[in-house]
């Protein structure tokens, strides 16, 4: 496996693979890899001839009050993990200036799907994500890119951008990978204290409760959301940022009796650490 | 020559040409072609294996008070002209929904170079231009695209976007083509009354005056701008929108004694018709 630090070198490599007729799969990450990332890479590898992963802690998707500085970084560990699942190239920009050189002034906004849920407390986040992903897509030139469903709103923002800008690549969904007790894997989990860590699986349990109620025929939005909140109350160290149900794919508010495909999404602070999780509910038949 | 109306068909065509190893040149236009556009197409054709031109009057780069509705359109005439200079494909979207389908919500902003000059009176213009060009680049998949120097600020916005987003194409400058009396060709010239048309060449004469003064050693910014305004006063039907000198490539205000490469740019209203023109001044030696 090769580590590429320069944009021009990465583009030259991908251009050459394309000329050879090879399919390029791509997994963009902020590093500090866990099995959730590796699952996305395995998925890419199974579907592509060659697999590129990027590792870049993107400063523009953090607000000044957020955790950019303390976001965990460990390139040697990440490179070994990526290699272990068959990644061919890790694109790891030499420094932030390789991505944002002097004079950089272009930004991409995906207006509607960026606004609710995480967009409320992180109003500049998805613009930063969209812009860096557009750049990474033009740098790695993949035929498809894999994004995890754990960050479901991010996935929707990227899918919308790719469709709206006619970008010539496919966006592939990867599953949320969980710890044995149900906590969704996240690079931020390492910031949890032992007590917080013990309570954090309430997020997944709350989503499962709603899933089971819906499977049993419950169609009342507020009852489902109430059930989620009741389970989250079992984690008193958690402070709810939001618990919401939104229609897919545009994240408009779900009606009182939802129909079709809805995203049940939540964000909970444990101290300064903000965890997110979600579940897609499929309401079938008449409301 | 073929006219393609669907995005997916255009992409499939370009993908196939790329697989064949052919170089694709691209000239995006709003149609109502004149010899200025044809010159860009000739340039593309000379440099590329296959040449694509697009014709799309892009609604998002017009403000509500601007001339979108009355912007001239004539596809049959445009297609014949494009064919006459060897264009292989005209991409002419079937309708605006082909480019902006329901749910469209993505926009690109190029902040600094979009703000001065035309950006003052047209604050939403360059965002619309950048977004549609990003789309067209992803649809036509060219190796290079040609833009005319008549719209110099637009050229700078596109160059900046392409560099900032790492888009894998080259931006080529095409020369401003002029009528015999010096008026820069523009699809909007047809809106001029005979009296306005007689006075409009003052734009080019004013730029030539400044060019000649600078060639003779004049380095005082305000004297050069004053000379431009003095010539423009010879066209009393014209109402100046702006006359400015800005440094290239970032369009920062030129100092009192400019050095290096500067853009001398102007916009003048004749009735409701707004004409623009510019000249690049090269100040060499010490200021």
Image (cartoon, coloured by chain):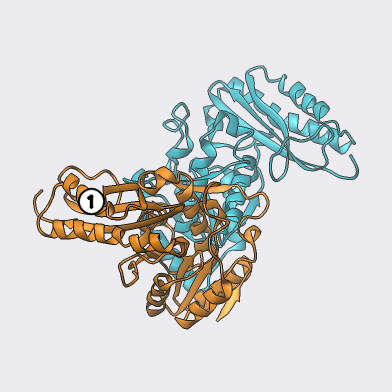
Chain colours: A cyan, B orange
Task: Name the residue located 46 percent from the left edge and 26 percent from the top edge.
Answer: A65
Label 1 residue SS = helix
- Quarter of the image with the N terminus of chain A is bottom left
Residue at the disc numbered 1: B230
Q: Is residue A19 above or below residue A163?
A: below
Q: Is residue B179 left or right of residue A163?
A: left
Residue A162: image quadrant is bottom right
Residue A228: image quadrant is top right
Q: Is residue A109 left or right of residue B281?
A: right
Q: Residues within 10 Å of mark 1 (few under 14, many from 20)?
A: some
Q: Where does the image place residue A73, in percent across and percent down from the top left?
A: 43, 38
Q: Residue furthest top?
A: A236
- Quarter of the image with the C terminus of chain A is top right
Q: Is residue A240 above or below residue B72?
A: above
Along the line of sight, the residue nearer the viewer: B233 or B71: B233
**How many numbered marks have been drawn onto this rendered protein structure?**
1
Task: Name the residue located 50 percent from the left edge and 49 percent from the top edge.
Answer: A133
Along the line of sight, the residue nearer the viewer: A11 or A124: A124
Residue B16 in view: no
Q: Where does the image place residue A164, in percent across and percent down from the top left?
A: 59, 54
Q: Where does the image place residue B50, in percent across and percent down from the top left?
A: 47, 78
Residue B150: image quadrant is bottom left
Along the line of sight, the residue nearer the viewer: A84 or A152: A152
Q: Is residue A69 above or below residue B118?
A: above
């Amino acid at each position: 496996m090769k580590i590429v630090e320069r944009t021009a070198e990465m583009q030259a490599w991908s251009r050459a693979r394309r000329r050879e007729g090879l399919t390029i799969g791509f997994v963009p990450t902020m590093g500090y890899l866990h099995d959730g990332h590796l699952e996305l890479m395995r998925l890419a590898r199974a579907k592509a001839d060659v697999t590129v992963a990027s590792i870049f802690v993107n400063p523009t998707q953090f607000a000044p009050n957020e955790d950019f500085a303390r976001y965990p970084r460990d390139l040697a560990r990440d490179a070994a993990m990526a290699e272990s699942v068959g990644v061919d190239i890790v694109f790891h920009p030499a420094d932030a200036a390789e991505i944002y050189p002097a004079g950089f002034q272009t930004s991409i906004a995906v207006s509607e799907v960026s606004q609710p849920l995480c967009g409320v407390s992180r109003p500049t986040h998805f613009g930063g994500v969209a812009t860096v992903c557009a750049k990474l897509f033009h740098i790695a030139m993949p035929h498809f890119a894999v994004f995890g469903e754990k960050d479901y709103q991010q996935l929707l923002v990227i899918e919308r951008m790719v469709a709206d800008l006619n970008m010539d690549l496919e966006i592939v969904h990867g599953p949320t990978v969980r710890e044995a007790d149900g906590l969704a894997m996240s690079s931020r989990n390492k910031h949890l204290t032992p007590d917080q860590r013990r309570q954090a699986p309430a997020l997944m349990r709350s989503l499962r409760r709603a899933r089971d109620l819906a499977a049993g025929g419950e169609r009342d939005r507020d009852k489902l959301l109430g059930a989620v909140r009741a389970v989250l109350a079992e984690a008193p160290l958690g402070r709810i940022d939001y618990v919401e149900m939104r229609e897919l794919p545009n994240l408009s508010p779900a009606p009182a009796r939802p129909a079709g495909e809805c995203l049940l999404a939540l964000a909970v602070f444990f101290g300064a650490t903000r965890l997110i999780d979600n579940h897609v509910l499929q309401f079938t038949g008449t409301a």
